[in-house]
Amino acid sequence: MSESTPPPKGPRGPRGERGVNGSPGARDPRGEADATPGATKPGGTKAYRAKSAGGKPADGKSPYRAAPRAGDRPRGASPRRADDSAGASSTGKPTVTRPAPPPLLPGAQPRAIAARVLDAVLHRGRSLKAELATALPTLPDPRDRALVEAMCFAVLRQPLRYEAALEAWMPRALSRRDGELRALLFAGLAQLDPLQLPAHAALAATVEATRVLGRKHQAGLVNALLRRAQRDGLPATDPRHSHWPSWLRGLLRKQWPEHFDAILANSAIAPPMWLRVNAARVGREDYRAQLAEAGIQSMAPAAPAEALRLDAAVPVSTLPGFAEGVVSIQDLSAQLVADALSPAPGARVLDACAAPGGKSAHLLERDASLRLTALDIDAQRLQRVRSGLVRQGFEDRVELLAADAAELDAWWDGRPFDAVLLDAPCSATGIVRRQPDVVLHRRESDIAALTVLQARLLDALWHTVAPGGVLVYATCSILQEENEAQVRAFLARTPDARSEALDARYGHDREVGRQRLPGEDGGDGFFYARLRRSPPDGSAHPG
């Protein structure tokens, strides 16, 4: 399930700060363009996961309201009388006219909003997606929205790095009541490393953000700590000292002992920006030439055939033909799913957990004659699928259904599918670099619940596969329980199912499938298994 995260630093904007993937919005954790500006997607578990607490507080008021303008009166204050400016009240006594506060420095508001988002995620267990969805619309400038996302993602990928700096430099730890201040300091440090924003702008605006947060009395502390970071750099930390929970680190160390350090290191850095060229509209090399003319450098991997890699991410609005569906945002590993499924021309195909829709679109780009059904349990997220299909001109080529894929009676007409894609709800442990808060909220009990759900979906959807047809099971997890162990158990209880080999482009051989790990070839962590249903006269094969 891997397909937002703000990409690495981009070109400098008019303010001297680096833009990060601007309009029309952020990228989905799977590396796909998100149709909802500024939103990111809860990784891996899709709508099957219980919604995290987040967003607006109980009174319906957003904590991300814009700061008051200079000279605004507090809410409820009486209007000034016309004669107040003359220096006397209605009683004849002289009045003291307080000077209006100076206007905020540009950039203070987005830094304050980033601090509030980080405080909610780090200290109150909120979902990053939910908080950003509430916060970003309060900022009209897409550069400010991109900056907020960049700061939040940079902090959440390596929170212990910034915590170590504060512990080393502060004689006394901040109290629990100082959560916003702590988050603001983290955001300030992240601007210096890894975002590398101009130090003078980052320091001044971050210090100014204390006014927005009602913490002007702590401006000196913020200024002193950030200036020390500017002068000395952040203290060195052991890269193995990770914020991943101990139970999850233990699993990874046991299951991937030779790759453990690389998994943690690659999950803590921003991913490259991957494009998927619409082969029905333009050849990959021709599109590379268009990018070069626009001053955008790209790299073409051997596979998949439509993929291009941008090491320096750019706003999607600068990509030639993006609005017309000529190109889309999708991670390398997610693009390989279409290769694994490889339906025959004109085949009847089911994308069983379709949102955000990149894989459905990819299949149609390759073969518009496919009879495709895109299914998702969340009707709202299915609208994202529809929006993407409209952009690419495929809205009339797909049947969209909102239903629980495991409840066949609710949606299936009994006609079998030649090919079924189950991109299953999972732990999202392969896309932590895109959804960094997943390891803050994930619990050990989640894995057992997810494996039960995955097995339920596999068992139900197998009935929809035509004899001789194929089901591809995919996740953006790197945990064996959700991947090869899940497939082995399915094969053991399903006599007419057998696994088919996939080649080395899909990653490490796990006998019943292949596993890509985070950062390999620049892609996300992803698992693939290709399962064939035996024809009626064929011999059963347990795997």
Image (spheres, grey):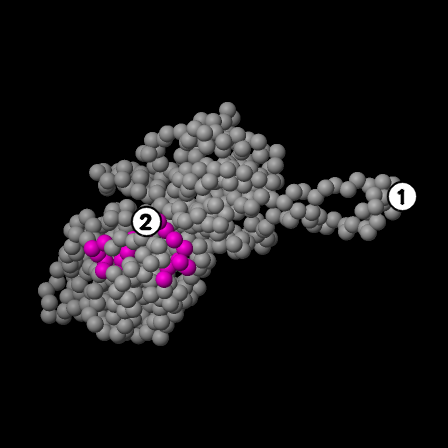
Question: Mark 2 or mark 1: which comes first in sequence?
Answer: 1
Please state the horizontal and vertical placement of residue 146, each as a whole percent of the image: 46, 51
Foreground: 142 or 513? 142
Question: What quarter of the picture does the C terminus occupy?
Answer: bottom left
Q: Residue at x 30, y 65 (%)?
A: 278
- Can you tell which mark lies on residue 311? 2
Residue at mark 2 to residue at mark 1: CA–CA distance: 69 Å
In the image, is residue 306 part of the stretch drawn in magenta? yes
Q: Amino acid at mark 1?
A: Gly
Which residue matches tag 1?
Answer: 92
Q: Nearer the viewer, mark 2 or mark 1?
A: 2
Secondary structure under tag 2 reads loop
Q: Residue at x 58, y 55 (%)?
A: 60
Please state the horizontal and vertical placement of residue 491, each as a whole percent of the image: 19, 57
Q: Amino acid at mark 2?
A: Asp
Residue lying furthest front: 293
In the image, is residue 386 part of the stretch drawn in magenta? no
**Residue numbers of the magenta segment:** 301-320
Tell me if residue 364 comes above or below residue 151 in the rendering.
below
Foreground: 291 or 112? 291
Q: Residue at x 74, y 49 (%)?
A: 77
Q: Residues within 10 Å of mark 2 (few under 14, many from 20)?
A: some
